[in-house]
Image (cartoon, rainbow, N blue to C red):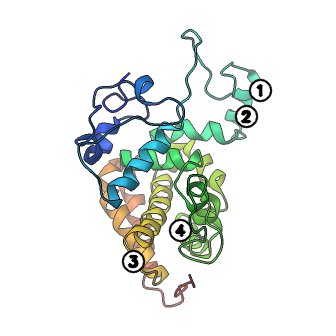
């Protein structure tokens, strides 16, 4: 299976989602087994890359780190248990929404969101995003959150940070559901995407919006200003994703989008957080 050109992770190839890297890489047709040795991703490029492309490359490396090889013969695998073997207990957990994190993870590919965001949520669910605590495992970096003074981790950035907490409060009011306490509070809705399709799209946009703004602060030297800008950023994203929403869900989608848009004008929103 080709690392860049085949669909070995999710519904689309890495070549499509990381086109800017693909056109520069020399090993376009090499297989997953040839390029990933369990530690290093053995790719070379035709020229040097800037900081933005380097960040994309590190993201691809993180995706590769989720690969696990096996010498076993091909066989059917029950994906809802750690050993791949079916059990009635594991099925009971799924039916009753008691599944643990691995149950949520495969459901991410069914969400009506851009493929690049699928990859982002996959990394988030695996705790493989390049937050500062994960980067510190590779090299010495400052570990404080870009929005506050706490140590940055996946859980802190997306759920515990004062900025994330405020954003989830706003979104909970929009969708009428208490969410944002943890990844599980969001991932559990992925299992019933038909019922929570619009809510899942809004939650994905919220997580992606936090991550995109965080990267702008980190790599582009932007300054954190206030919650209204972040909410408007999420609103613009949801506006662009409307084409992905099925027609029968558009009324719900538009009503919730307008409600979130109105929140960006509220005068009582958190004005800013010290860095």
Residue underneath mark 1: 89
Number of other residues with Cα within 10 Å of mark 2, as a class: few under 14, some 14 to 19, many 20 or more: some
Number of other residues with Cα within 10 Å of mark 4, as a class: few under 14, some 14 to 19, many 20 or more: many
Q: Residue at x 47, y 62 (%)?
A: 211
Q: Kindly identify which numbered label has been placed on residue 222.
A: 3
Quadrant in which the N terminus is drawn: top left
Q: In this view, does 202 lie to the left or right of 30?
A: right
Number of other residues with Cα within 10 Å of mark 1, as a class: few under 14, some 14 to 19, many 20 or more: few
- Earlier-in-chain disc, 4 versus 3: 4
Q: Is mark 1 on a helix, strand or loop?
A: helix
Q: What element carries label 4?
A: helix
Q: Which residue is drawn at 30% across and 58% down?
A: 50
Q: Are marks 2 and 1 in contact (CB under 8 Å)?
A: yes
Q: Tell me the distance, in whole angstroms, between the alpha carbons under discs 3 and 2.
A: 44 Å
Q: Residue at x 55, y 59 (%)?
A: 131
Q: Tell me the distance, in whole angstroms, between the alpha carbons under discs 4 and 1.
A: 34 Å
Residue underneath mark 4: 171
- Residue 161, by quadrant, is bottom right
Q: Are marks 4 and 3 in contact (CB under 8 Å)?
A: no
Q: Is residue 232 left or right of residue 186?
A: left
Q: Tell me the distance, in whole angstroms, between the alpha carbons under discs 4 and 3.
A: 24 Å
Mark 3 or 2: in front is 3
Residue underneath mark 2: 93
Question: Between residues 214 and 252, which one lies in front from this camera angle?
Answer: 214
Q: In this view, does 1 lie to the left or right of 120?
A: left
- Earlier-in-chain disc, 3 versus 2: 2
Q: Can residue 111 be seen in this view?
A: no
Quadrant in which the C terminus is drawn: bottom right
Compared to residue 112, the image places residue 259 above or below, namely below
- Earlier-in-chain disc, 3 versus 1: 1
Q: Tell me the distance, in whole angstroms, between the alpha carbons under discs 2 and 1.
A: 6 Å
Q: Tell me the distance, in whole angstroms, between the alpha carbons under discs 3 and 1.
A: 49 Å
């Amino acid at each position: 299976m080709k690392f860049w050109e085949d669909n070995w992770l999710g519904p689309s190839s890495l070549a499509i989602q990381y086109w800017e890297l693909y056109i520069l890489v020399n090993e376009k047709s090499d297989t997953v087994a040839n390029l990933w040795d369990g530690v290093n991703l053995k790719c070379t490029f035709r020229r040097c890359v800037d900081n933005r492309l380097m960040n994309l490359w590190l993201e691809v490396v993180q995706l590769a780190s989720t690969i696990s090889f096996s010498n076993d013969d091909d066989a059917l695998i029950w994906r809802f248990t750690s050993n791949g073997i079916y059990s009635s207990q594991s099925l009971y957990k799924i039916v009753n929404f008691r599944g643990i994190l691995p149950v949520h993870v495969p459901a991410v590919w069914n969400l009506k969101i851009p493929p690049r965001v699928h990859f982002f949520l996959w990394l988030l669910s695996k705790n493989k995003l390049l937050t500062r605590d994960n980067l510190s495992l590779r090299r010495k970096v400052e570990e404080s959150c870009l929005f506050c003074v706490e140590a940055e981790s996946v859980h802190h950035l997306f759920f515990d940070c004062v900025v994330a907490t405020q954003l989830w409060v706003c979104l909970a009011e929009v969708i009428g559901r208490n969410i944002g306490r943890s990844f599980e509070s969001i991932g559990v809705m992925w299992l019933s995407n038909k019922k929570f399709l619009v809510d899942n799209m809004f939650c994905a946009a919220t997580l992606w919006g936090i991550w995109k703004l965080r990267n702008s602060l980190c790599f582009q030297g932007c300054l954190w200003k206030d919650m209204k800008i972040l909410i408007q950023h999420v609103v613009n994203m949801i506006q662009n994703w409307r084409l992905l929403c099925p027609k029968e869900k558009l009324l719900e989608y538009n009503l919730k989008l307008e409600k979130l848009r109105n929140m960006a004008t509220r005068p009582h929103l958190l004005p800013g957080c010290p860095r």
